[in-house]
Amino acid sequence: MKNHIDKGDNMTNQTVNAVYQNIVGETLSEILADRGLSARDLALQSNIEEQHIHDIIAGRRMVSDAYAEGFERVLGIDRSFWLNLQRQNPQWGLWGL
C-alpha cells in the first residue's frame, strides 16, 4: 500500500481515495492470509455474510460495530481496533463512526 502521496503526482482524486480506502480491507486480507483463513471461513465463524466480507476487503462496505464484534470473536483482535481503523478511512468519515 502506498503510504505517501506526492502532490506533484498526476493522480486523480479517485486514485488518491483508492490509496486510503482499503486500509481495513488490506489489513483484514493480510490477517486472514497469515492465519490461513478465507473470507468464507471468517463468514461462517462470525455469522457475517460472505459477500459482506468480500465487500469489506474490496473497500465497498464499512466495518460496522456488529462486524467488528464478529471479527473480534473469530480473530481475537479487539473490536475497537477495527472501528479505529475504519475511522482512518476518509471515504467513510462522513458516516459518523
Image (cartoon, grey):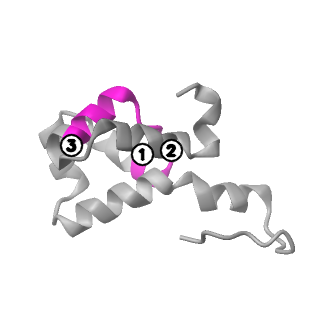
Residue 75 position within the rendered picture, expressed as x and y whole percent measured from the top left: 19, 49
- Amino acid of disc 2: Arg
Whole-angstrom CA distance, mark 2 to mark 1, is 5 Å
Label 3 Cα crowd, 10 Å radius (few <14 / some 14-19 / many 20+): some
Residue 59 position within the rendered picture, expressed as x and y whole percent measured from the top left: 50, 49
- Amino acid of disc 1: Asp
What residue is disc 1 on? Answer: 55
Relative side of 77 to 1, left or right: left
Q: Which labelled disc corresponds to residue 43?
A: 3
Relative side of 55 to 87, left or right: left
Circle 1: element type: helix
What residue is disc 2 on? Answer: 60
Task: Between residue 1 and residue 13, name the one nearer to us.
Answer: 1
Disc count in the image?
3
Task: Between residue 55 and residue 85, name the one nearer to us.
Answer: 85
Query: What's drawn in magenta, residue-wise?
Result: 56-72
Sequence-wise, the earlier of marks 1 and 3 is 3
Q: Is residue 54 above or below residue 5?
A: above
**Residue lying farthest left?**
45
- Amino acid of disc 3: Ala
Q: Determine the residue positioned at 50% across, 44% down.
A: 60
